[in-house]
Structure formats: structure tokens, C-alpha cells
Image: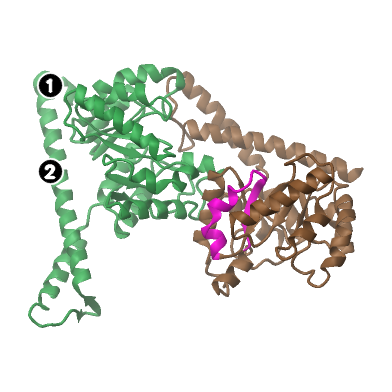
């Protein structure tokens, strides 16, 4: 996430090796909105010079104007914060569709990242995330959610176990990517040593999250590492595939390996992990090439 | 257990299980599915010889062929994997209803256990659990292989990845008045399926959270742990008697609660104590049934082939 109004940060954003850059018209640019909007078109072009996909986070209160300022060639999608109803999604989608037509973009090409920051949004999650085929990702804005619920989060006690579990399940069921960091950084984001960020991002992945919104550039490297299958995992999953194939050839699909039980879903997951490792390697190469250009 | 591995099926009755799941699904290689189906009818009486109930797990995508092969007298329950919609359960129900009629099985006796192993299954969980009167027991099982694959997570971490899904399952089951299985989080960071010590902790945790039923295990080494952990211990039984004794002191006093040795005894505590005693009696009865079945089977085997018993 980069404040769209901060020219310096926008100029630096593409050097941080993120898979996506979101230009934020929202928080932190209060009062400077009109100015920030004016600069978005150029900021999109600048951010897109690397290999990162570019998104713009718009304001709910100035949705029309922000979308008018943001839907340009080079933008991959829009982040919609504080969503509380399916109607908000379809309204935004209608505006974007009109702008796509008017500005020569492929119809339906822009995707939406939806953020939910209220009880109403969490409760209505299913209707919201199935409201438009544009929605590719959904996350909780836990800072907003804490304010909405009147919670002053303490790092020791995670107040959003239920909401985050609901998110992972509903998003997966709707074939939308759940995104988010693990607690407490999910609600109380701050800079921390890389191993801490890595460990919480790994936890997020193992709760069903498909990515993390990084409020600080320093999060990007450990988050990328956490979402890339390790060499150890790759080696293990290769062994899983071999052991499973040998088991099937010998007449059983339940195979013991290092005290674990390998059967169909374990083999299927091994296929996914190995494919993910390859996809990450390709993406990393793309990003390296773009950076050196 | 995979029905295609004869040594598992042949020895299963000796393990002291309350139920045995004859598997046609993920432990059976694709090219052996038809062969596997042909084995179930004989496997049902084999695995039941020690008093265990015989369950069969069928495949998600070959319901008709699988049910035709498994619905025979002696089958107690059909486990249906990766259930995602109530209609799937209703389809199973209608086919089982026909097969019960055709094969002289008392109508409505074969149960359906819809496994929830995907996010979509959880999203539709209440409708699924209530889709058929044949669903009598419901809830989380011990595995999580399919669910992990669906959510895209690595298993065997040191925090509870499925607390939400398990909570939804329990709420659905309790709301519908079904028998409820539960698996409170006990970390298994090695992924071992044969760790009896961990299995005991898991089963005890389940009992302490008010669950009476387990989902079974993947290795014979955990059977005794599950049986032991889900049976009220002597201390629990003694304590339950004590609670009821204290509660009786309230009779005629007009008081609704009494504090004894720092504990509050009221009708809720008394109800819990009665539940423990009932459950302990049911466990004892079940153990007796199993012991009888084993003795009967051994006697028959001794008659037929004394050498086979060793």
C-alpha cells in the first residue's frame, strides 16, 4: 500500500519487489484527496513500470470521482474499502464498466479487492463477495473492524478468530482469494524484524490467506518468502508424489511416509505445492527482469 | 481402512473398535475401484466380528455404483466424503431407501454421515446436516487432509486452523439435536497417525469439552487411546456420585444451590453428573457387547480351526 499523494513513496514503490502495488487514495490523504486524484493516472504508469500489478484503493465517500480518476490503462483493479453490502459492489462495478467502455479497456477486465471493516460487512460476506465476478480477493480491515466493534485490540488476545475463520471459509467457497495478515499484526500493523513478519505471514498462509497487504515496504520480502514454498517443502512433496505413485502401483492409495499417512488429497496437495513453487520462480524471474530494465 | 488390503480387513475385528470404516475412497487407487466395490459385501461381516459397527466410505462421484455394492444387511452407516450440498445427501437417502426395500433391510436403519471436508461444505453446513433423518451423528472428524487441500494450507501446525469450521459443525449438529463429534485442538506437529499418547490427549480433550463421540483414527495404535479417552474415568464417576449426593441435600430446603468445598452445586451440575453416569454406563455396556462378540468369534474359530487362533 502506498499513499497516492506521496510522490516520493510512489516513485520508490516499484523497487520493493511487491507482486502488487496499491495506490491509496484513502486513509492518510484526508483533505488532500483532490490533489491525490489528479496524480493517480501518472502514478499508475510509474508504478506499472516494474512487474507489479497496480491497484487503486478508492474512498467510499467519493467513489465516483475516485473511480473516474483511477480507471486507466495499466490499472489491474480497484480496492473497495468498508464494503457493507452487495449493492455497493454492483454500483462500483457499473461505474467501472462504463469507464472501461469509455476508455478503451476490455470490459470486465478490472478486478476488485474488497475490504470488510464492520460487523455488517462480515455478516453479509457471502452476498458481498458473490455480487460481482470482478471480485478476486477479499480481506478484513481489522483496524476498522475493531473500531466498529468498540474493541481496543490487545496483542495477547485475538478478537477476530471467528471473523477470520469465516473469511477463509466463505472466500474459498466462493473461489475468491482471502487476504490478510495473522494477529496481532493484522489489527496492529507495525514494522518488525523480518523473522517475525515471516512467521506471522506463514501463519496467515496456513489459516487460508492467499496474500498479505503490506502497509510497510519492509514487510514485502518476508511476506514473499512466506508465500513461496520452501526448498524443504518442495523436497518433501516430491517424495510424497513418489511414495504415492509407488503405493498405487502396489495396490494401495494409503501409504505411510515418515510416520505420516499419504493418500489422495495429500498427493493432490503435493501437486499444488510443486506447481506453486514453479509459479513463484517464474514470477520472481519476471520481477527481477523488470527491475533490471 | 482400504478394503483392498485384505490383512487390514481380516484383522480389524481384533482391535477393539466401536466402528470400522471400510474405505472405497481416497485410500483405494483409482484402477482398483471396481474390485474394491466387489469386496465390501464380505468385508462387512468380517469387520463386525468383534462387535464393531461396519461403516463404508463411498466415493463422492460414483454414488450409485458404490451404494449398490455396499448396502447390505450389517452395514450401519454410509460415510459420504466432501459433501457440499444438501441435495447430495437427499440423493443418497433416496437410493439407500430403495436398496433397503429391495434387500430386506429394515427401512431407515442405514445412517448417512456427510463429511464436511471443504469450505463450500461448511458454508452449506446447516442444510447438509438437516437434509435427511438418516443423519444422526455429525461433526468434525480427526482428519483434515481434504480440508487443508481445499483451504490451501499446510497441516500439522501449532495453532487451530479449523476452529471456525469445527464450531459451525458443532452448532449445526447441536441445533438439529444430532449426536455431535468434536475435536478440540491438540497440536500434532509431526503428522503422526500412530501416536497413541497424543490420541489419548485428543480423546480426553474431546470428553472434557462435552463430546461423547470420536471420529476414529487411521492406525490401530490409536484405538485403545480413543476408547479410554472418551470413556469417563473412575474419578469422573466418583465425582459425579458425589455431586448428586450433595445436590440431594437441597431437597426440601427451598434453596437452588449449595456451596461445598468451594464448588457450587446446582441443578446444572447435577444434570452434568447424571450425564456422566449415563455415559459411563453406556460405555460399559458397549465394552461388554464387544467382549461378548470377540468371545463368540473366538469360540467359533476354535471349533472350525483350532490352529488359526494361536
Residue drawn 48% across the image and 31% down it: A264
Can residue B89 be seen from the camera position used here? Answer: yes
Residue A120 colored in magenta in the image: yes
Q: Which chain is green?
A: B
Segment tinted magenta in the rendering: A119-141
Task: Give the label on residue B306, or none.
Answer: 1
Q: Nearer the viewer, residue A141 or B263?
A: A141
Regarding mark 1 in the picture, which secondary structure is present there?
A: helix
**Mark 2 = which residue?**
B288
Residue drawn 12% across the image and 21% down it: B306
x%, y% of residue A114? 65, 54
Query: Disc 2 is attached to a residue of which chain?
Result: B
Which numbered disc, 1 or 2, marks the residue that appears first in the sequence?
2
Q: Do labels 1 and 2 share a chain?
A: yes
* Label 1 – label 2 distance at C-alpha: 25 Å
Q: Give the class, few, some or many, for how many residues have Cα within 10 Å of label 1's Cα (few <14, many ≥20).
A: few
Q: Quadrant of the image for the C terminus of chain A?
A: top right
From the image, state the color of chain A: brown
Quarter of the image where one finds residue B144: top left
In the image, which is nearer the foreground, mark 1 or mark 2?
Answer: 2
Amino acid at each position: 500500500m502506498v499513499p497516492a499523494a506521496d510522490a516520493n513513496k510512489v516513485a520508490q514503490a516499484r523497487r520493493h519487489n511487491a507482486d502488487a502495488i496499491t495506490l491509496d487514495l484513502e486513509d492518510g490523504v484526508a483533505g488532500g484527496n483532490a490533489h491525490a486524484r489528479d496524480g493517480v493516472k501518472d502514478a499508475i504508469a510509474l508504478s506499472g513500470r516494474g512487474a507489479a500489478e497496480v491497484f487503486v484503493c478508492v474512498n467510499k465517500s467519493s467513489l465516483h470521482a475516485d473511480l473516474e480518476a483511477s480507471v486507466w490503462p495499466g490499472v489491474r483493479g480497484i480496492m473497495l474499502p468498508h464494503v457493507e453490502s452487495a449493492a455497493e459492489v454492483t454500483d462500483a462495478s457499473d461505474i467501472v464498466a462504463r469507464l472501461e467502455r469509455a476508455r478503451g479497456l476490455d470490459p470486465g477486465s478490472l478486478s476488485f479487492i474488497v475490504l470488510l471493516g464492520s460487523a455488517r460487512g462480515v455478516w453479509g460476506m457471502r452476498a458481498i463477495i458473490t455480487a460481482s465476478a470482478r471480485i478476486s480477493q477479499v480481506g478484513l480491515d481489522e483496524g476498522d473492524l475493531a473500531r466498529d466493534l468498540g474493541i481496543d485490540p490487545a496483542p495477547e488476545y485475538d478478537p477476530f478468530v471467528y471473523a477470520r475463520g469465516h473469511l477463509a471459509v466463505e472466500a474459498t467457497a466462493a473461489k475468491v482469494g482471502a487476504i490478510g495478515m495473522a494477529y496481532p499484526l493484522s489489527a496492529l500493523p507495525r514494522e518488525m524484524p523480518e523473522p517475525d513478519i515471516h512467521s506471522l505471514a506463514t501463519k496467515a498462509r496456513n489459516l487460508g490467506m492467499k496474500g498479505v497487504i503490506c502497509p510497510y515496504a519492509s514487510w514485502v520480502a518476508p511476506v514473499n518468502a512466506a508465500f513461496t514454498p520452501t526448498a524443504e517443502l518442495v523436497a518433501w512433496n516430491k517424495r510424497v508424489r513418489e511414495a504415492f505413485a509407488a503405493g498405487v502401483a502396489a495396490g494401495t492409495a494409503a501409504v505411510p511416509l515418515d510416520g505420516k499417512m499419504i493418500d489422495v488429497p495429500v498427493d493432490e496437495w503435493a501437486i499444488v505445492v510443486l506447481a506453486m513453487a514453479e509459479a513463484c520462480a517464474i514470477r520472481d524471474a519476471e520481477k527481477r527482469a523488470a527491475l533490471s530494465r | 481402512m482400504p478394503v483392498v488390503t485384505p490383512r487390514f480387513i481380516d484383522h480389524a475385528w481384533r482391535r477393539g473398535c466401536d466402528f470400522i470404516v471400510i474405505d472405497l475412497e481416497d485410500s483405494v487407487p483409482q484402477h482398483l475401484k471396481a474390485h474394491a466395490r466387489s469386496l465390501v459385501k464380505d468385508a462387512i461381516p468380517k469387520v463386525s466380528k468383534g462387535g464393531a459397527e461396519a461403516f463404508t466410505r463411498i466415493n463422492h462421484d460414483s454414488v450409485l455404483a458404490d451404494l449398490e455394492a455396499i448396502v447390505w444387511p450389517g452395514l450401519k452407516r454410509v460415510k459420504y466424503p466432501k459433501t457440499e450440498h444438501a441435495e447430495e445427501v437427499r440423493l443418497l437417502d433416496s437410493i439407500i431407501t430403495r436398496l433397503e426395500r429391495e434387500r430386506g433391510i429394515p427401512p431407515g436403519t442405514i445412517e448417512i454421515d456427510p463429511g464436511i471436508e471443504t469450505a463450500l461444505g461448511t458454508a452449506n453446513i446447516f442444510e447438509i446436516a438437516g437434509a435427511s433423518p438418516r443423519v444422526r451423528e455429525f461433526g468434525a472428524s480427526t482428519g483434515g487432509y481434504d480440508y487443508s487441500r481445499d483451504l490451501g494450507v499446510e497441516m500439522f501446525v501449532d495453532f487451530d486452523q479449523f476452529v471456525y469450521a469445527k464450531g459451525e459443525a458443532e452448532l449445526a449438529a447441536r441445533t438439529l439435536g444430532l449426536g455431535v463429534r468434536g475435536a478440540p485442538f491438540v497440536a500434532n506437529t509431526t503428522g503422526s497417525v500412530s501416536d497413541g499418547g497424543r490420541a489419548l490427549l485428543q480423546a480426553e480433550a474431546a470428553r472434557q469439552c462435552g463430546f461423547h463421540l470420536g471420529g476414529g483414527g487411521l492406525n490401530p495404535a490409536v484405538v485403545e487411546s480413543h476408547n479410554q479417552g472418551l470413556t469417563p474415568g473412575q474419578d469422573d464417576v466418583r465425582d459425579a456420585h458425589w455431586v448428586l449426593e450433595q445436590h440431594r441435600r437441597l431437597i426440601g430446603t427451598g434453596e437452588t444451590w449449595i456451596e461445598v468445598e468451594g464448588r457450587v452445586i446446582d441443578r446444572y451440575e447435577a444434570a452434568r453428573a447424571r450425564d456422566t453416569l449415563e455415559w459411563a454406563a453406556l460405555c460399559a455396556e458397549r465394552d461388554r457387547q464387544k467382549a461378548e462378540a470377540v468371545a463368540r468369534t473366538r469360540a467359533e474359530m476354535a471349533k472350525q480351526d483350532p490352529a488359526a487362533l494361536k
